[in-house]
Image (cartoon, rainbow, N blue to C red):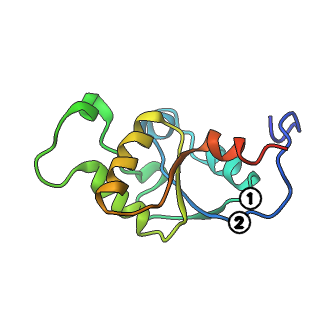
Amino acid sequence: MIAAKRIILSTSPENVSTVYHDSCYLGRYNGIYEAPRKVLASAGASLASVLREKEKGFCCGAGGGRMWLEEAGESIAGIRAEELLGSGAARIAAACPFCITMLSDGVKDRQSEVPVLDIAEIIANRLV
């Protein structure tokens, strides 16, 4: 819709450093890796990278109902949040509500204020 100009985004520069978390379902199950990144880039995001991304991405910890499990020791979400925060990006983006919840918890556990946003929120904030 963005490419077809059905959604018009602001052309004012944003250039916010953003790291994208590949969700298990959208990414590894459906093989969709570049489309979310293109959407973010079209919104003016400057994309940061992490070691484990795309086909080699790391789960947020919510899969298989683990979202409801209290983990002993280091949480999967905490490990993933640490990796994403290590990119130095000003914000974390994801396209899965479970990932957003898990990563938000992981970021808070690290006393970080880096926002975890749905890519739809980022686009909504750039609408003309």
- Using the image, tell me which numbered label, if any, was put on residue 6: none
Q: Which residue occupies 52% across, 64% down?
A: 49
Q: Which residue is mark 2?
A: 15
Q: Are marks 1 and 2 in contact (CB under 8 Å)?
A: yes
Q: Which residue occupies 36% across, 50% down?
A: 58
Q: Which residue occupies 46% across, 64% down?
A: 50
Which image quarter holds the N terminus?
top right
- The numbered mark, 1 or 2, whose residue comes first in the sequence reads 2
Q: Which residue occupies 84% across, 51% down?
A: 10
The number of numbered discs placed on residues in the rendered structure image is 2
**Residue 65 in the image, given as x and y percentages of width and height:** 27, 28
The amino acid type found where label 1 is placed reads Gly
**Residue 16 in the image, given as x and y percentages of width and height:** 65, 64
**Residue 128 in the image, given as x and y percentages of width and height:** 85, 44
Q: Is residue 116 visible?
A: yes
Hey, which residue is sitting farthest left in the picture?
A: 72
**Residue 35 in the image, given as x and y percentages of width and height:** 65, 44
Kindly indicate the quadrant of the structure image that contains residue 46: bottom right
Classify mark 1: helix, strand or loop.
Answer: loop
Q: Which residue is mark 1?
A: 44
Question: Rounded to the nearest whole Å, what is the CA distance between mark 1 and mark 2?
Answer: 5 Å
**Image height check: is 96 above or below 115?**
above
- Left-right relation of 20 to 103: right
- Left-right relation of 56 to 74: right
Local crowd size for mark 1, using a 10 Å CA cut-off: few (<14), some (14–19), many (≥20): many
Local crowd size for mark 2, using a 10 Å CA cut-off: few (<14), some (14–19), many (≥20): few
Hey, which residue is sitting farthest top in the picture?
A: 65
The amino acid type found where label 2 is placed reads Asn
